[in-house]
Amino acid sequence: MPEPTRDEIPDVTTFVAKEADRYLATLDAAPVREPAAESVESAFGGPLPEEGDGALSALSELLEEGVPASVRSAGPRFFHWVIGGVTPAAMGAEWVAATIDQCAGAWDASPLAARLESVSVGWLLDLFRLPPTWGGVLTTGATMANFTALAAARSWWAERHGVDVDRDGMAGLPPVPVLAGGYVHPSDVKALGMLGIGRDRVQVFARDTIGRADLGAMEDALRALDGAPSIVICSAGEVNAGDFDPVVPMAELAERYGAWLHVDGAFGLFAALSPRTEHLVAGVERADSVIADGHKWLNVAYDCGFAFLRDPSRLPPVFGGVGAAYLPGVGHRRPNWGWLGPEMSRRSRAIPVWATLRAYGRGGYRAIVERGLDLARHLADRVDREPDLERLADVPLNIVCFRYRPQGLDEGRLNALNAEIGRAILGDGRVYVGTTDYGGRTAFRPTFVNW
């Protein structure tokens, strides 16, 4: 009866390294998705084995049956969602992280993981040119980064009503006013629901069907609150065309009416890395909280995100108000990251973050961002030269929104045709790019984010 043994380890590491090399060598030529992906349900399943076949047998089955059913999103022809690849340094560090298997919840559990998270947060603040007095925490991605930041905003809001909401809950409090432009992302809305604020509490102020913020209407709503605290969400990089809410005007509104300003910069915050695009995030340092994703333009493996706060002392009261006799206290002199974010059991995602920043530095990441900008501009120029293609939006960053537009078709038939082409592209699998709805028009929105 097979049980885990140390004797398996050399064979496993050798086998996996060899197969990883083989897989990565196929990324340039193999389809992004193979037809076999449709039959993945039949490849895996059945009853739980009473007796297993050992590590190599299981891994061989996984690679033989699983890889053809995977999507090669790490490759150079994947342009669908905003998904980065994995830099060589980040990939190697992921293997290290799995090998040494550190719990990053408390300093005592792993001084290495705790220290690397401190360094990584500081380096990321520097990379994005946020003030060094800020702080933050690594999360699983943008959803939990938004949850973390908006939880701090909720606590701030409740304080202004004289309530410790993290201790006493929301009972008896009025609804939380949340204001946003039309670019507000579902992850923000989801986080508000999880926080008990409510998904439908978001007041969206858009001046067109695209979602561009209506600042006049937003100011009217803030003024009507008559000094009551509120939360304003600014979207730095929406996912259809890469457009940005106006950061500075929204910061001015938040300051004028005493609101908490939250900036969702899941991928758009990386505009700060290039002189060509840094104007898009000018003023972000005036926010109270800012988030971004690591598995987008930082090009580390899933999952990784970051939440940054102007006042990091707001995190421990939100996430560190509980404990146990065997756990270090919130006021421990060393950083205990389980008290600064939602998860107490945390993998050490700081290991690959630190490694990739250490390996490539500011200059390497500026090059990655600017290569994405160049490719987006190149595609936009090609679209503009083709009589049967129509670009639907400007290209401020790394997304090109366009559609196929032959003559003689009305909007309904154009939408149906582009949707059909989109399904065919994904089914074909050689290149991966999906469709979206852009102001009522079915369009493509390839994104350039992979190193």
Image: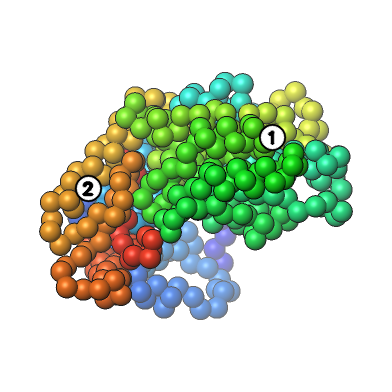
- Please determine whether, in this image, residue 361 is positioned above or below residue 350: above
Amino acid type shown at disc 1: Gly
Question: In terms of secondary structure, where does tag 2 sit?
Answer: helix
Q: Residue 396: x percent and y percent?
A: 33, 41
Amino acid type shown at disc 2: Ala
Q: Is residue 419 left or right of residue 326?
A: left
Near-viewer residue (139 or 404): 404
First along the sequence among labels 1 and 2: 1
Give the labeled residue for mark 2.
Answer: 380
Give the labeled residue for mark 1.
Answer: 258
- Please determine whether, in this image, residue 76 is positioned above or below residue 53: above
Task: Name the residue furthest top.
Answer: 132
Near-viewer residue (261 or 111): 261
Question: In terms of secondary structure, where does tag 1 sit?
Answer: loop
Q: Residue 33: x percent and y percent?
A: 30, 64
| Coloration mode | rainbow
The residue at 64%/48% (across/down) is 221
Residue 14 appears in view: no
